[in-house]
Image: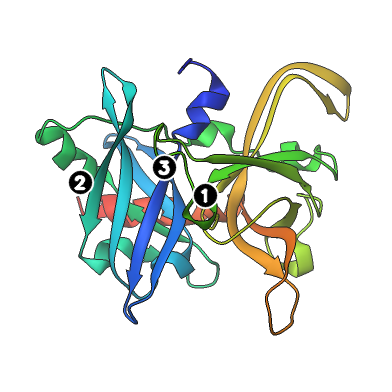
Amino acid sequence: MNLNDIGTQLLFTTIPIWIEKGNGLLAHATGFFYMKDVPNKGPVPLIVTNKHVVENATRGVLGFVKADSNRPLVNQRITVEITDRKILTSFLHPKYDLAVFPVGPLINRLTETGKSILFRSIMSDIVPNKEIIEGLSAIEEITFIGYPSGLFDHKNNAPIIRQGITASPIWNDFNGEPVFLIDAGVYPGSSGSPVFIYNRGAYPTKNGITVGTRLLFLGILSETLTRKEESKIYLGLGKVIKSEVVMNFIDYAVEKLTSSV
């Protein structure tokens, strides 16, 4: 395994989340790591997922990848149970399907007990600005990573990689909301998956063909669309909350977390 490869590193940006709701229902979903660097206070690690995942949760379980010398260990995960629902519901977006909760204290406790984990965080340097977004094509290839229907490679501690295309232009607000649609195999459990543009070798831009690698964080998958009938029929479409909304909410959460320190 080449951990210096960008595509390989993306595997370790996600984490499976198992949630027990107040009504006794069990749910599984995806979260991803984000690292916010705060001047004079250092990095603040967070897990980002959907509000509908953690809302009304009574407890949750996170599945970290166990590591040795910064290498993932086969078939070994470290599960951390969270029984304080206030942690899971630390920050719920008042309007959009977003949730953010701090994971630094959990990671510190694992480290203090000699448990090593491997993860990679999404950071601001791959978040596209307005100029980059407006320069994208209406049809872009996208990659998203997660745990559809709770499925992942247990033996190798690896999530499922899926690809598709944009079903609505990223630079448009679909139906007036800060979201866009993707045409891909989106199923329950994929909620919370980070969505990227990941090109390697060569890719088209408004100026022609560019040689190299491009990695952009576009947003978070929040919903799989179905036909409005009694029995759910999946349309192969997913709704993605744009990275701008995600970043603004992360900034808000980190400001609240660090202002009390």
Give the residue pinned by disc 2.
Answer: 105
Residue drawn 76% across the image and 49% down it: 170
**Dot 3 corresponds to which residue?**
33
Position in image of residue 77 (x %, y %): 29, 39
Q: Are marks 3 and 2 in contact (CB under 8 Å)?
A: no
Q: Nearer the viewer, mark 2 or mark 1?
A: 2
Which amino acid type corresponds to the residue marked 2 in the rendered image?
Pro
Secondary structure of the residue carrying tag 2 is: helix
- Residue 36 is left or right of residue 107, and the answer is right
Q: Amino acid at mark 1?
A: Met
Mark 1–mark 3 Cα distance, whole angstroms, equals: 13 Å
Q: Examine the rendered structure and indicate whether residue 39 appears above or below residue 29.
A: above
Q: Amino acid at mark 3?
A: Phe
Q: Position of residue 10 (x, y in %)?
A: 52, 32
Judge whether 8 appears above or below 183 on screen. above
Q: Residue most toward the bottom?
A: 230
The disc, 2 or 1, on the residue closer to the chain's N-terminal end is: 2
Q: Quadrant of residue 230?
A: bottom right
Decide which of 102, 67 is in the foreground and name it: 67
For the point 41% across and 31% down, the residue is 156
Report which residue position mark 1 lands on: 247
How far is the residue under mark 2 from the one under mark 1? 22 Å
Q: Give the colouring mode of the picture.
A: rainbow
In terms of secondary structure, where does tag 1 sit? helix
Q: Name the N-terminal-most of marks 1 and 3.
A: 3
Q: Dividing the picture into quarters, in which one does residue 218 lie? A: top right
- Pointer 2: residues within 10 angstroms few (<14), some, or many (20+)? few
* Nearest to N terminus: mark 3 or mark 2: 3
| Mark 1 vs mark 3: in front | 3
**Residue 90 shows in the view:** no
